[in-house]
Image: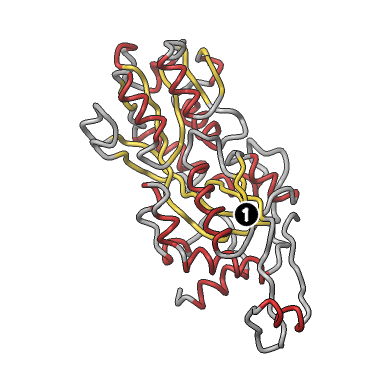
Amino acid sequence: MKTIRKTLAAAVVLAAGLAIGNGGVAEAKPQNLSVVTGNTGGTFYPVGVGLAKLLSDAGMQAAADVGGGNSNIIAISKGSADIGFTFSPTAVFAANGDEPFKEKFTNLKGIATLYTNVTHIAVTTDSGVTSVKELKGKSFASQPLSAGSATFFRMILEANGLTEDDLEIAVRGGPAQGAQAVRDRRAIGFQATAGYPNGSFSEAFLSVPMALLDIEDDTFQSINGKNPGLVRAEIPAGTYKGVDKPVKSIGASTILIVNADMPEEDVYEIVKAMIENLDSLKAVHGSVRGTTVESMSKIAGVEMHPGAVRAYKEAGY
């Protein structure tokens, strides 16, 4: 693990003016925390940067780095990062060793739920595409395999009798790269599972006349039957330019995970800082404005770490 805990002698604690607990020695806060997020055009990344700043302001040195909902599972499990962003259904895939994972990852614990991500499948209006099935043979921008969005998109295609091989994948990257491919006319659309409003989609819809594809009921039922963590969701009318009616989609909760071996005291300090400074995190992005301590404490897809349990109980949840 990259987390560093420093044990200070009582004399050093007193000299530094730190608070001393009942045992006479203050527990130092975890330091040098690495937070793995998502690609820069998605929602994980800006929220992760905000989380790293929150933790640093609370006395913990933390830094955010790019990652992906799938790859973050591996990074946390193997100990190459401390806190990871992922989707609740992705945690279920990982625990069971289901695709896209080739082994079971059972040493993960949850510490918070932040917000719901909703799948966006955007296409240019002049493409004439009005359904997922009509993406066949079209030039499209998809996501890297490290991203949970890529897994969900493949499930959507499969439920419609397609694979990514049936599309002409123009680029693999985050929504920022997808939006650029659309603006450059290299692709007729792009996709991501992200919180809304997402900046990359907002910019694309302002630049090119676009629409969002509905995920129909039979597609949702097929997907939900394979992983109940993927739930019915909706993108409200007016979220993006030209979207004048609600769009039916699927959603997945964003959860924060840590390695099960992370010390309880470390996790307690992290979650306590998040609880006490939640307003600063909510100011980072529209997707987290509705987050509450109660909603943070409701984690699906993975068992909660004992340090997080302690922090939420102390806060009354």
Q: Position of residue 140 (x, y in %)?
A: 47, 17
Q: Nearer the viewer, residue 87 or 85?
A: 85
Q: Amino acid at mark 1?
A: Ala
Which residue is label 1 attached to?
62
Vertical comparison of 65 with 113: above or below: above
Q: Position of residue 265 (x, y in %)?
A: 66, 71
Identified at 21% across, 31% down, the residue is 244
Identified at 47% across, 75% down, the residue is 315
Q: Dot 1: what SS? A: strand
Vertical comparison of 86 with 204: above or below: below
Q: Position of residue 102 (x, y in %)?
A: 71, 38
Vertical comparison of 251 with 59: above or below: above
Q: Is residue 298 left or right of residue 308?
A: left
Determine crowd level at label 1: few under 14, some 14-19, many 20+ residues with C-alpha closer than 10 A: many
Task: Please tell me in which quadrant of the rendered image residue 240 appears.
Answer: top left
Task: Please tell me in which quadrant of the rendered image residue 12 appears.
Answer: bottom right
Q: Is residue 138 left or right of residue 124?
A: right
- What scheme was used to colour the molecule? secondary structure
Vertical comparison of 19 with 197: above or below: below
Q: Is residue 49 left or right of residue 191?
A: right
Please, which residue is most extreme toward the left here? 244
Q: Is residue 113 left or right of residue 197?
A: right
- Quarter occupied by the N terminus: bottom right
Q: Nearer the viewer, residue 131 or 172?
A: 172
